[in-house]
Image (cartoon, helix red, strand yellow):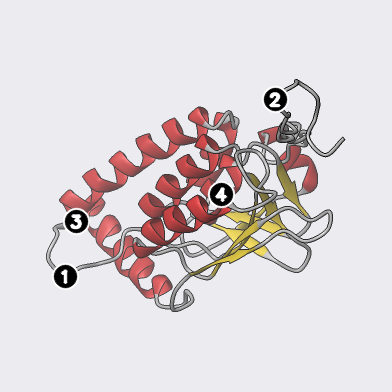
Amino acid sequence: MQGLRTWRATILLLAAGACALPAGSRVIFKAGAGNRPPQILVKGELVQADVESFTTTAQTALTTPGGGAGHVNVVIDSRGGNIWAAMTIGRIIRKNAFMTRVERGASCVSACVYLLAAGEGRYVGGRVGIHRPYIPNDGVTSARAKKAQYEGINMQSRQYLEEMGVSAALHDQMMQTSPDRVTWLSEQEMATYGLTKTVAPPPRTVPAEPHSRNGTPSGH
């Protein structure tokens, strides 16, 4: 009985905390310019609708001049949101070998960390914070059912981070921080967990020069 009371109190607290999150996310595409590769900006609270928006934007980035797999930066500034949306978008990021960045002055908190972890290369100039996932109170699901949901989230969160090659110790520290608090990670902690990772982008493919019928390049 005491356990049920504790879970009920936690769920109510999480629901209250959810109200403090931004109203919604924006997924914005920016074409490359000069030495800057194409960018996908993700700002605000992550919601389920962002999955479709990000999928469409990723396709644009893959077909734009200077883009393609391995040549797109996903620039994130988010206090978190829907964990399922975050993991789905994260898998799109990894599939296309996109890079992830938290620029100076930006924050990546809670579910946002799943996006950061998905980058083929990862840069952090801003702040990264973690805590346990929360389950909003829908007024219908029982505390016992919510506990089962939470255990499922816990398991899938660990599996996802392992899939992304991030240390399981990051997941353990997440679970040790209550949802109404944030543990801000130091540079050393991020490096230890594997959240920062520098990789060289793949070489760009240069289109072959068209040849004339006699085998010499056209225009010569």
User: What is the residue that sits farthest to the top in this orientation?
Assistant: 215
Mark 2–mark 1 distance (CA, rounded to whole Å): 74 Å
Q: Position of residue 58 (x, y in %)?
A: 51, 52
Q: Is residue 117 left or right of residue 53?
A: right
Q: Which amino acid does label 3 sit on?
A: Ala
Residue drawn where x is 43% and y is 62% of the image? 81
Q: Which mark is residue 143?
A: 3
Circle 4 packing at 10 Å, graded few (<14), some (14-19), many (20+), is few
Q: Name the residue under label 1.
A: 139
Q: Earlier in the sequence, mark 2 or mark 1?
A: 1
Q: Which mark is residue 63?
A: 4
Q: Position of residue 198 (x, y in %)?
A: 78, 36
Q: What residue type is labelled 2?
A: Arg
Q: Which amino acid does label 1 sit on?
A: Gly
Q: Is residue 138 left or right of residue 94?
A: left
Query: What quarter of the picture does the C terminus occupy?
Result: top right
Q: Earlier in the sequence, mark 3 or mark 4?
A: 4
**Tag nearer the camera, 3 or 4:** 4
**Tag nearer the camera, 2 or 4:** 2
Q: Residue 213 carries which label?
A: 2
Is label 3 in a helix, a strand or a loop?
A: helix
* Residue 217 to residue 114: above or below: above
Of residue 99 and residue 190, the one placed in the foreground of this image is: 99
* Residue 122 to residue 214: above or below: below
Q: Earlier in the sequence, mark 3 or mark 2?
A: 3
